Image (cartoon, coloured by chain):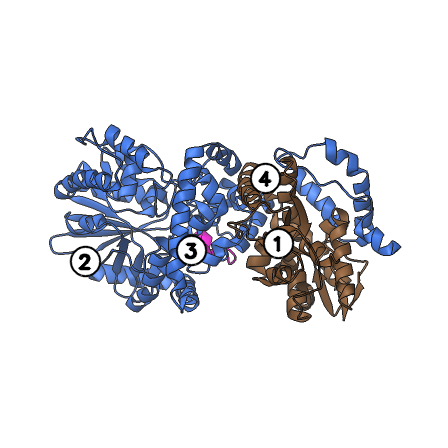
Amino acid sequence: MRVALFVTCLVDGLFPDVGKATVRLLERLGHEVVVPSAQTCCGQMHINTGYPGQALPVIRNHVEAFERADVIVAPSGSCAGSVRHQHADVARKHGDRKLAEAAESTAKRTYELSEFLVDVLQVTDVGAYFPHRVTYHPTCHSLRVLKVQDRPLKLLKAVEGIDLVELPSAETCCGFGGTFALKNSDTSTAMLGDKMSAVLSTKAGVLTAGDSSCLMHIGGGLSRLRSGVRPLHLAQILEHTR
Amino acid sequence: MTTFLGMPTGGGHLTGEPFPKAAKHALGNAQLRRNLAKATGTIRAKRANVVGELPDWAELRAAGAAIKDEVLANLDEYLVRFEEALTSRGTHVHWARDADEANRIITGLVKATGTREVIKVKSMATVEIGLNEALADVGVHAVETDLAELIVQLGNDKSSHILVPAIHRNRSEIREVFRREMPGVDPDLTDDPRALAEAARKHLRHKFMTVDVAISGANFGVAETGALVVVESEGNGRMCLTLPRTLISVVGIEKLVPSWRDLEVFLQLLPRSSTGERMNPYTSVWTGPTEGQTSHVVLVDNGRTATLADPDGRAALRCIRCSACLNSCPVYERTGGHAYGSTYPGPIGAVLSPQLTGVDKNPTLPFASSLCGVCYDVCPVAIDIPSMLVHLRERVTESKRATPESTAMRALAWAMSDARRWRRLIRLGKFGRVASRHVPLPGWSTARDLPQPPKETFRDWWESR
């Protein structure tokens, strides 16, 4: 299958290893990966901070960049969520019906990585090997916007050698929330503190999730604590082989 | 959105300090954090249990949303029908466009009875309009008879939760409030819940038997018949509704359901969502005054019509004040209700308060959420609070002239709407490698390290492959 990778702005600029891992994983599973060069960002930060009008040209750019793609895969529940649940609405509210229709078409072709693997490729064992103690944080938008349910866990459980431990209060938000972490940094930090306590209680060496943004947040806190816990995106674990 | 000239905005207790500032203060209170985590955790688990056992919860929820939407779409007609039904039963109906007018009407009615004291059924609408203070200004003491409201009142405190106003207090704190403030209380009172309840009971029984004017709110009003409904746990509300000779009920105009049978849906949704019970202990329904009683209904707008005018915000008026969103919210659990500055805290408060007052008076509340979405999942009338918060954020940014933030966002959007510009921008990240180690990002860097930008962007790697 020919898969168009929506790498997301955060991965492109700050966490390229997550993009590389996604490419290698999909190629290992026998699929052709293309990276439409016109892509930039989904515009979610603008939409969620109260600037949907400014996001409009960003949305238009995204829709045009992926116009010809059959399937679009993003290593992010949040960005895939914005494409699927916000783009068409924003376009419609700003009176651009043509863009709204095009955005609806993009939305139908867009998958978060775990959804794509489990639902489209129908694979849970991707042949990975990762002999470490790992705990998984289900990110809010993958859980409650996309409803990926236990797809990421199914994928992780099939990894050879993995010691997967349950994260207490796993479904509680880590406190990132985009610009929330800056505008309400004290509340965000309190939420982060509870999330880190939960992570540390598992004695896992690796924290994984399907979103680099949440991992940047929790990972940034764990790094400040010199905890030694490594944040790794789901794709980076699934890409790992013997 | 169209704003109609002269549409009343909400006054009373709907605003406070900016959320981030108030939250910072609350977050420093370790006792509060412990009390809230314990209480919300307990109610969350109870709710999940009793909601999980209903196979048709999704259908009930959809029905609740649909009934409320239908009422809101035809509110003008339902309100008139409700007024006619009430009047035909002998209840006097009054209309109040805002908190001030409501308080003027109610204090006038109370003063006409000559009483110096009124007993109150727990009511959010009366807290919203600041009725107790308005009554005090004319020399009338209002006695809260709901146990938690009584604790708040005696402690000279403020409610921090819709359903459990004293959720921020634990039992030893409550004992201290009672020992200090409750007339004639046993000085050896323990913090045993039974002993605390007994002390309150003795105090309140005396009031029930001696005070002749009561003020209530209503959970629902039935447009077809003029029936009012109060749902409660303690039975104190029923005492107030039945004993005094004058009953004044303060009702938000969005509280209506079309007919009696519609209550079937809400009387299942409400207790399971709020207290985590299959059924609440007391449901009082009354249609017109009882024999020898004079009854008044004060219908309050206080910003509700303005809320109704916004197609993307009006679903907030579906709210049945169950508090499930408060109990589930990770922000509320950590900051408590006072940080929201309004009678309505938590996620529903963050979308309702700014709409009732106008966003200019509550510009920080729409941002008081990480948009994690739990509130939408647990809402029994399916209010999409996260999307509504995002919509209200837009109304806030649009209400301001250019700010440093809006300028920065505009520049970023410009870069992000073209791949060549974007590429040049993220390549600068390489130069940010040093900066990220030494330049703190306000807010972020107090507790988190910044990621070190990579030597090579994904895009550069991909093209060099």
Same chain assignment for discs 1 and 2: no
As measured in the structure, the alpha-carbon distance from the residue carrying label 1 to the one carrying label 3 is 48 Å
Choose between A113 and B321: the one closer to the eye: A113
Tag 2, which chain? B
Q: Quadrant of residue A90?
A: bottom right
Which chain appears blue?
B
Choose between B404 and B430: the one closer to the eye: B430
Q: Nearer the viewer, mark 1 or mark 3?
A: 1
| Number of numbered discs on residues | 4
Residue at the disc numbered 1: A163
Q: Nearer the viewer, mark 2 or mark 4?
A: 4
Disc 2 to disc 3: CB gap under 8 Å? no
Dominant secondary structure of the magenta stretch? Answer: helix
Q: Nearer the viewer, mark 1 or mark 2?
A: 1
Amino acid at pointer 4: Lys
Colour chain A appears in: brown
Q: Which mark is residue B90?
A: 2
Q: Which mark is residue A183?
A: 4
